[in-house]
Amino acid sequence: MANCKKLRLKDAALKRLLSVVVVTLLGVLLLIVSLRTNTTPVLSELDEDLSEITDIQSFSEKLNLPKQNEFSIRLAKINQMPPRNRDLYPKLAKDHITIVLYVHNRPQYLQVVVKSLSKVVGVSETLLIVSHDGYFEEMNKIVEGIKFCQVKQIFAPYSPHVFPDSFPGVSSNDCKEKDDAGKKHCVGSPDQYGNHRSPRIVSLKHHWWWMMNTVWDGLKETRGHNGHILFIEEDHFIYPNAYRNLQLLVSLKPIKCPDCYAANLAPCDVNLRGEGWDSLIAERMGNVGYAFNWTVWRKIHRKAKEFCFFDDYNWDITMWATVYPSFGSPVYTLRGPRTSAVHFGKCGLHQGQGQTNACIDNGSVNMQVDDIDRVANIRSEWGVHVYDNQPGYKAGFKGWGGWGDDRDRQLCLNFARMYHSYNTSLSAVTMS
């Protein structure tokens, strides 16, 4: 009898132990599934997830784009992945204004911008698209840490940073500096000042143009979007009231300034913080915190030839000096009398980030945010003060150069064709 009792006790203990082991294993498995569901896989783990996505390589070959390497193809596939954080923010506000943040490789700056965005009132209502000029792990990790809204990352698959030994990157037989192509037997056509292309510099204009074409015409999330889209950069500090102010500007623009093409969060002169008047301001379009709609994008897209052939590696100077003047009337933007965004960068985009001669200022930013900057401070009853004849780049300016290589110009035109059937205006453009 005693032996039977002992056996029953042992059996009961064994059953309890097995139950604990099974429950523990189930818990571990659930944790693993949860982590895989709520994190973005690193590049080496993406192949299985991307196996069903469009054949990017055949797509690029039809457009006569540069032959992609394996890394470029994988980046192009990642661009088709859905936004993250949809479990946290399942629905976007009906009239949300999508925010596009375009970045290069200045992680110390990006951290400041992301922190400022996290405090923006209303940011959880919208989608944040982060457009990367190539792939840099530190930049990617910062963006993956964003939890305050839906986030979609896109990577420029034709960035010079992705092609280490061929165009659009550096080719072994490329002409350099002021080389004579005939004497050196090298490849390349110089700019108006006799200088050959620098991949690190031309990437600025390439990225902006690729991003614009992709956001407006390529992405499922924004293709055909009729509303405004806000564009900011990795060295733009965004005030807490920026999104609410922008919503007000967009709603007031058709009434107060029907001829305005855009809305801006900051003055065109990046050194100014605003007039402080009880008035809206109409001035030439700036490059800090600018927003426009699909109708304006179509006007810009139709000027692809002007954009791609202007000899200046800066996208904004190209727009001011050749694209906007071609519209036939002044290109005004509407903004408030007090800035809601500030350009704080000191390091240029092409000053050797990630190398021994990198431009580093530790990203130290002491931006004063007053109480008035925390809430919407634009009033619907205000009138509009118009700035006429502002200084700045205008039609007739020849450009700073850096954009003379025929290959860059053709790649730029091909970006304009990416999401469209070949039409007469673009296909008729030749490099002769």
Image (cartoon, rainbow, N blue to C red):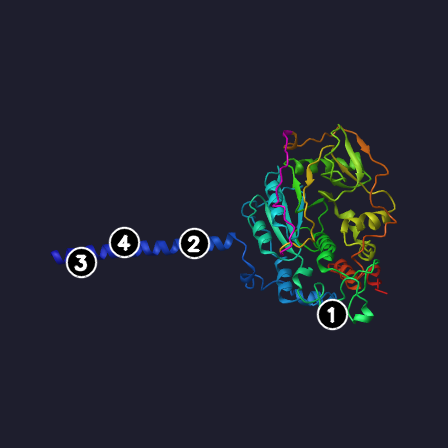
Q: Which residue is mark 2?
A: 30
Q: CA distance from mark 1 to mark 3?
A: 83 Å
Sequence-earlier tag: 1 or 2? 2
Q: Which residue is mark 3?
A: 7
Q: In the rendered structure, does residue 430 fall within the stretch colored magenta?
A: no
Q: Quadrant of the C terminus?
A: bottom right
Q: Which one is in front, 184 or 28?
A: 184
Q: Which residue is mark 1?
A: 173
64 left or right, relative to 25: right
Q: Which SS type dominates the magenta stretch?
A: loop
Task: Estimate the x, y position of residue 365 in percent, counting from the top left.
Answer: 62, 40
Sequence-earlier tag: 3 or 2? 3
Pointer 4 with pointer 1, Cβ within 8 A: no
Q: CA distance from mark 4 to mark 3?
A: 14 Å
Tell me the amino acid under the disc marked 2: Leu
Toward which corner of the image does residue 173 lie, by quadrant?
bottom right
Tell me the amino acid under the disc marked 3: Leu
**From the viewer's perspective, is the residue at label 3 or at label 2 nearer?**
2
Magenta region: 355-371
Q: Return the mark for residue 280.
A: none
Sequence-earlier tag: 2 or 4? 4
Q: CA distance from mark 3 to mark 2?
A: 35 Å
Q: Secondary structure at mark 3?
A: helix
Sequence-earlier tag: 4 or 1? 4
Q: CA distance from mark 1 to mark 2?
A: 54 Å
Q: Which residue is mark 4?
A: 16
Task: Estimate the x, y position of residue 87 in percent, counting from the top left.
Answer: 54, 48
Task: Estimate the x, y position of residue 296 in percent, counting from the top left.
Answer: 78, 47
Tell me the amino acid under the disc marked 1: Asn
